Image (spheres, grey):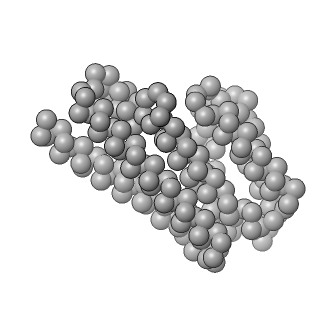
Amino acid sequence: MSRLIGLVLLLAGMLYPFAVYFGLGHIAPWQFALLLGCLWLLRGLTGERRPGSLWMAVVAIGFCLLLGVVDSPALLSWYPVLSSGFMLILFGVSLIYGMPIVERLARLTDPELSDIAVRYTRTVTKIWCLFFLGNGLIASALTLWAPLSWWTLYNGLISYGLMGLLFAGEWLVRQRVRGRA
């Protein structure tokens, strides 16, 4: 059940910019807050106890409560910034405590990583941190100074395209690094 809720929350996050763009004339901000808040509440109540899951749910529910009380269309645009902030914190904290996220993912397929591979995964985790920082800053700038159509285009399409390019670029680099090793 928790995986299904996580998947629905991920899908809702990806479709959120389009829902805001097309739904703003028909759905009040407090209604967006209610739907999003319910998803985060379910995630918090049924989610696996992974690092960060509870505090992310609490912060997201707090954002939804604020959005519901203020009922401001302008506040709707800050959700992608919040999401990028979550990812930046998760990846960044993993560099300080425990195993970096990219190393954890790499160990799913290769439990015995070499020292070179461990350093490489640490570097890739840092690159993802920079990506999420930049993504959050761009989303913030668009929220503050751009029309809703630009905000929607970036947060609903371009940012995911950039993530895909980063994934693909990292995969190509990894193949070259493996070929040399």
Disc tally is: 0
Q: From the viewer's perspective, is 41 left or right of 173?
A: right
Q: Position of residue 16 (x, y in %)?
A: 64, 57
Q: From the viewer's perspective, is 47 left or right of 62?
A: left
Q: Work out which residue is located at the far left of the displayed protein and give it.
A: 180
Q: Position of residue 12 (x, y in %)?
A: 64, 50
Q: Work out which residue is located at the far front of the displayed protein and give it.
A: 96
Q: Position of residue 77 (x, y in %)?
A: 68, 64
In front: 162, or 55?
55
**Which quadrant holds residue 3?**
top right
Residue 101 visible here:
no
Residue found 66% across the figure and 56% down from its top: 79
**Which quadrant holds residue 89?**
top right
In the picture, which quadrant includes the N terminus? Answer: top right
Residue found 43% across the figure and 60% down from its top: 161
Residue 96 visible here:
yes
**23 shown above or below 121:** below
Q: Work out which residue is located at the far top of the displayed protein and give it.
A: 112
**121 shown above or below 16:** above
**70 shown above or below 55:** below
**92 shown above or below 165:** above
In the picture, which quadrant includes the C terminus? Answer: top left
Q: Position of residue 23 (x, y in %)?
A: 73, 66
Residue found 35% across the figure and 27% down from its top: 107
